[in-house]
Each structure stands twice: as structure tokens, then as C-alpha cells.
Image: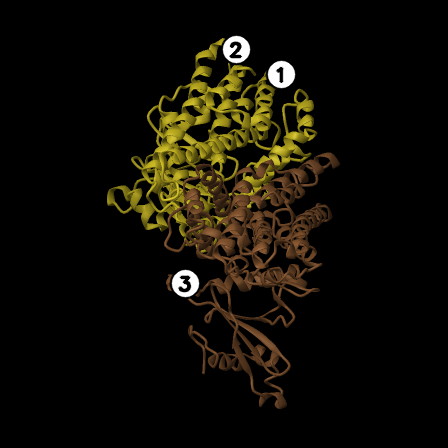
Chain colours: A yellow, B brown
Amino acid sequence: MAFLEFTRLDERSVIEYVKSVAALSSLLKLDDEDAATEKLTVKEIGDGNLNFVFLVSNSSHSVIMKQSLPYIRCIGESWPLTKDRAYFEAMALEEQGRITPHHVPQLYHFDPTMSLIAMRYLPPPHIILRKGLIAGIQYPLLARHIAHFMANTLFFTSLLFHSTLDHKRQVAKFCGNSALCRHTEQVVFSDPYQISQYNHWTSPYLDPDAEALRHDNLLKLEIAILKSKFSEQAQALIHGDLHTSSVMVTLESTQIIDPEFAFYGPMGYDIGAFLGNLMLAFFAQDGLVDQPDHRKAYKEWILETIEDTWNLFYKNFVALWDEHRNGAGEAYLPAVYNNPEVQLLAQKRYMTELFHDSLGFGAAKMIRRIVGVAHVEDFESITDAAKRASCERKALNLAKMLLKDRTKFEGISQIVSAIRQF
Amino acid sequence: MAFLEFTRLDERSVIEYVKSVAALSSLLKLDDEDAATEKLTVKEIGDGNLNFVFLVSNSSHSVIMKQSLPYIRCIGESWPLTKDRAYFEAMALEEQGRITPHHVPQLYHFDPTMSLIAMRYLPPPHIILRKGLIAGIQYPLLARHIAHFMANTLFFTSLLFHSTLDHKRQVAKFCGNSALCRHTEQVVFSDPYQISQYNHWTSPYLDPDAEALRHDNLLKLEIAILKSKFSEQAQALIHGDLHTSSVMVTLESTQIIDPEFAFYGPMGYDIGAFLGNLMLAFFAQDGLVDQPDHRKAYKEWILETIEDTWNLFYKNFVALWDEHRNGAGEAYLPAVYNNPEVQLLAQKRYMTELFHDSLGFGAAKMIRRIVGVAHVEDFESITDAAKRASCERKALNLAKMLLKDRTKFEGISQIVSAIRQF
């Protein structure tokens, strides 16, 4: 069987596909005489919103096969979405993998015709971080790893490292992912603030909260500014969807997956996505257990992780800046920023703006998960609707405050204090 | 003679070229039997910094032929610059001509191999606006025309009018003009603030002023922010070099030429370029005449033109926004910004940021014309160096103040008051 045109794979045809591609046959040792006769097993394991994901294994080796279809999986054919996203995911995996190979699964194969990516399987005990947060598991290396991933992928694709010529070449390449950018613009920056058929929330409890959003002029002004930044500012190659279900973890390993929304956008969108989703996890904790104090220590760990993530990101990012300040990066030429005082001022200003952007985007991501189309399992797994609504309302109110007042905060410890007050 | 590969044209070969292209032969009536025998005249009239420009005429028709060479004309082969800029100039002329045909010369022909553009000749009494400003000529329609050009070209290429898909497609196309963007980054945002072989100024008078720039940390911080905006913010298709030598005028006509620096950048860069160059013209006036009061009325006219340009731009831009608010533009969806109060707030905020950007970019353009590589005839034609330096210092000091304090200004009339104080 040849795959010369796009065909939706199923559990049977995916085996034919693997056999037809030398690189994959070789990975699964199908060219080995003993193994060739061995049965391959296939399991569809996609639980995301968008794609189909197959785990193909023999007794000793496994490969992940991810196929994009021309619509959004969790909605169906009524919400079309270009399957070209697989191309951008493959390019981003490659680029991020080159920059931080320890935190990105290896790309084995990409087939543009089939919109298909083959990549390294992350074996147990890897689980989706969100599920770990719901289960109350502490990940002592999480903040350090995520900070490393974000600082490196964002720094090395920004004008702090790139020449203008390299930067614009890369920006142009990822402009092609416009359909997914447009999708984000709609579901994050627009739908929660208007009546949309896709919006839903814990009704009737949050009915007045959802309505209030649609009448909050000051909030709309702030979201407009963030939407413009998202649409116009080609600051770095961002993951574009860096929530806690795009991270797989064990106690020792942190792997970033699913960069199909990647494009050159504002760095704060990635940082905010991660921090905002940790905040959602924080507010969900009281709903996930019978007694609020059952997760008291765990909530403290989440707050520490929020604080550590930003602080370590800051430290790593500025260290990279210092290390590469005589390189090709054209934003701050050493001959202009040639004294320690102006260097320090420039870095402080840059990082402060990035902090405020991160707070704003993080808040926007929290709001959309409570009143928009796609919710998070952290809240959804709270079966008692009243209890869920109470957790969600706290998160929503924090997010509204952060979105409006983000520029008043000077450091992450003030954010942690603010979270405690909701 | 065929032109199958790039050949630098001279006054003789340009005639061969015209004869070899049907569209141009036809324009010059070379296919008309009577005219075919008529002699064509050619004159090289390029007085810009970058290219060669030929005027090809018979007794009744004329065509402008502009060729880009792989270096900067005013420096020579030691400063290479991609001749692909002709492609971006042709694309921008086409796009701007489509949007505001009355203010852009018609594009007749583009030859990518020869890096050659043929366009409509703007006949006398059209002159370069800068020369008109030096001669003390008032142009009663200038502010209205420029405001129309800027409002329309910027609005119709922004996300206020574009869908995200159209916008990113266009952004990608113009990312290819990165060599010229990089050139601007160097000469506008970097060189004036560092020691550079190309910098020069009215020495020894401005030696301390030039040195002070290189040690002004707060100024460097502000220029860094503007440089990042210039390099990262794909807000609209900007002309990219909208100074007073990129405008040709008569008392009735205003034509915008030379958009070879065009790309998707911040709108304020165009607005600031024009306003900043008017300010340079203002400060040059006292040096251009024997007695300061000889140009008193003219200086008032320049100030009025500065004020009218911004005010009419504001009015036109917001009117376009109102008119097209139910269109494809995705920045401010009507269902979100669905009440007059939030609409008004959003427009006010947008225009205020644009105003501050314009002041900053305008100031940067002024500074670079006094201590950078390329100066302006307004000042250069003041033969008495002491007098010239005195005019330049006033412009420089205003620009430094505007760059640092731009966000403190609320309207253009405050800027006019500030100009009077220098």
C-alpha cells in the first residue's frame, strides 16, 4: 500500500505505513529477521483537542505517530482547521530539539502529504503534567526544566541572538501557520468576551461572571492590547500552546510536546501559558479533595513552582544574554550598550516588560479556560458543580485583576501574595 | 541587445532596453511610425543616496527608469546592498498605488533580473518637497494629502482591515526585504549612538553633542525600545523612508515615491519620518536666510503643517476604522467592542500609542540626520558652519527631549509649543 495522497490512518493502516517507511521500519527493527515476524501493536492514545495519535510498538521499541486531520478533533468536521499544522509542528520540534534536546522528544520522520509526524515515545512513568498536578504529585525539577526550555528556545530565536536577516527568514517561514494563530486569536482573545456558540461554563453558577466579562470595558481594552501583541510582535519562536497538557513529566524528566501552534510571537505568551495553567491547578486543588487542608502542602509547592519558574527563567535568560552579547544578535549591539550601567538598565527594562506581558497572557489563558470553548481537566474533574464554580470563580477573579493591573506588579513574589488573597 | 542577465544601464543602453520592452515602447509611442524615427533623450537624474534614475523622453512622453545596483550609490561598492530592493519597491508602489492612486506614481513595468522599475514621470513643476521647503514655498494641500496617504496605506494594510490570514501572507512576503530593514536598523537606531566610520557632523561645533549621545544611557534605553518595535512589530505595510525627499510636490499635487524600504513595520515609523523631517526643515530656516525674521511666516506655516498633518491623519484614520468596523479586520471585532464607550476608549488608546511611537521615531530620524551617515540638504545648504551647527543643535536637543519624554505629550499642539521653545 502506498500513501501518495492524504489518507486518514487507522489502527490497521498505520502498520502498513510504518512498514512502508524505511526509517520507521528500522526503528522498530522490522528489518531484523527475528523481529520482522513479531506482531506490532497499535493503540490510539490521542486525548488532546486536535489530532489523532498512535502508539506503535513491538515488544522492545515504540514510536509515536501523530496525524493532523483537516478539522478540530474535539469539535468535529464543523470546525475545519488546516492539516498543514503538522508541518509547523515538525519544524518547531526540530528547532526546539536542536536548542534543548533534553526537553523535546526526538523527531524521527515527517510526511507532509500525510500530515504525519513520527517521534520518540516517552515511556512510563511519563504522564501529562496536568494529570500529575491533579493527582497531587510534586515534581522537584519541573521549574528548573521549564525555565531552561523557555529561556533557551526564546532567547536563541530572538533578536538578542539572531541577526535581522536570519530572524526575518524564520519569521516568514512560520507566518504560514496563520490558520492556527487565527484560531488562538479567536478562542483566547475574542470568544470569551463575546457571545459565541462554542463558549460554555459552569452554569448557572458562573452565568453572571461570564456576562460581566462581556461588559467589562477596561478588560476588553487590555485584551485588545494583548491580541495586537500576539498578532504583530515577532519576538521569538514561541511554542504557542505551552499549557500543562503540553508537558510530559516524571520525577526526573520534563518533555515539551505538541508545538503545532508555533510561530514568531511574543515570548510572554509561552511564559504566561505555563504560569497561568499552574495558577488554574492551584485553584482547582480545593475542589479535588474533600477537605481544603488535604492539599495545603501541595498548594504551597505549586506557588513555589510558579515563583521558581519565573525566577529561574529570568536568571537563565539574562545569563544567555550576557554570554552571547558579543554574538550576531542585533537588538543590543555591544558598542552601543557598552557600559555595565546601561546594560543593566536595558536588561531590567526588557525583563520587566516581559514579566508584564507574561502576566497578561497568563491571565488571558486562565479566563479562556473557564468561560471559553476548551476547559481544563483540573476543574472539569471536580464533579460537584457548585464546588467547581467556586474554584473557577477565584481563578477568574485573579485573572481579571492580573489582566487589568499587570503593570503594577514588580516581581513574582507579589503575584504569589496576590494568589493567596483569592 | 537582450537583457537576460543583470547589466548596469547607462544613458545609451537604457534606450536599447526601452526599445526591447513592448509596454515601454508603446508608452513612448515607438510603435507609432512617425514617432519611431524620433530621437529619444535620456538624462540621469538620480540624486538620492541609493540608486540610478533615468528620465527617458521623446518630444511628448516621458518615463522614469530606476535601477538598483548591488551597493549604496552615495557610498560606493564598499557598502553593498541587495538589488532585490527594486522588487520590494515595485510591490509597494503597486500596493500603495492601488490604495491611494492619486498620491503614488503609476508603475509601468518591473524587471526583476535587471532590478529595474519603470514608472510615471512626474512633470514640472513637481519638485522634491525638501527643495520646496528650503526655498520657502508653502504647499497649502500638503498636510491634507500626506495625511490621506498615510491614513489609507497604513489602515488598509493593518489588522484593523486585514484578516489574520491575509496579514501574515503579506508580512511573509515583505520579510524578504530584510537587508534594507537591517540597513535602517544600523543607520537610524545604532550608528548615531556608537562610534562608526560613516558618522559625521558639523565639527568641531557638534563634537560634544555627538559624544554626549554616545554616553546618554536613558536615550539609549529609549532607542532600544524603538529599535525592537521597528524590528518586531508587523503592524502595517509602511513606506519605510517617508522623509521630505520621498515626496514630490506642486501646489496642487503630492506624490509619494521611493518605497524601496517598505515592509510590515510600526506605523509610527512613517508618521514620525515625515513629522521629524518637517521639524528639521523648521530648524534649518534661520540658517537659510540672512535675518531670522525673513522666514517667520514660513516657519509658522511649517508648524501649522506639522499640526494639521497629525490632526488630519488622526481624523482620516479613525474615520476609516469607523467605516470598516464590520469588515474582515480582526483586531477589534464588533461583537466584542460592541458599545460606543468601549469603541471610543479603544480608538483613543490606539491613537495615543501611535502618537507616542510617531514622536519617538520622528526624534530618532532627526538625530540620525545630524550625527549619522546621511544628512539633509536643509542643513547642508547652510554654508556657514557655525550657523548650521546652531540650527542643528536646536533640532538635536528637541529630538533628545522628544525621544525621552514622548509619552508625556497628549497632543500635537503641545509638540508645536515645545518646538517653539528651542
Pinpoint residue B182: horizontal percent, then vertical percent.
44, 53
Quadrant containing the C terminus of chain B is: top right
Give the chain letter at badge 3.
B
Mark 1 to mark 2 CA distance (whole Å):
14 Å
Q: Please name the amino acid that badge 3 sits on.
A: Ile
A252 to the left or right of B308: left
Give the number of the mark in front: 2 or 3: 3
- Of badges 3 and 1, the one in the foreground is 3
Q: In the drawing, what numbered circle is on residue A290?
A: 2
Give SS at disc 3: loop
Residue drawn at x 44%, y 39% is B216
Q: Relative to the observer, which residue lies in front, B62 or B124?
A: B124
In space, the residues marked 2 and 3 are separated at their CA atoms by 76 Å
Give the crowd class for mark 3: few <14, some 14-19, many >=20 residues within 10 Å: few
Q: Which residue is mark 1?
A: A386
Q: Secondary structure at mark 2?
A: loop
Q: Are marks 1 and 2 in contact (CB under 8 Å)?
A: no
Chain name for mark 2 = A
Circle 1: residue type = Ala
Residue A83 in sight: no
Amino acid type at circle 2 is: Asp
* Residue A55 picture location, percent across and down: 40, 37
Badge 1 or badge 2: first in the primary sequence = 2
Residue under pointer 3: B75
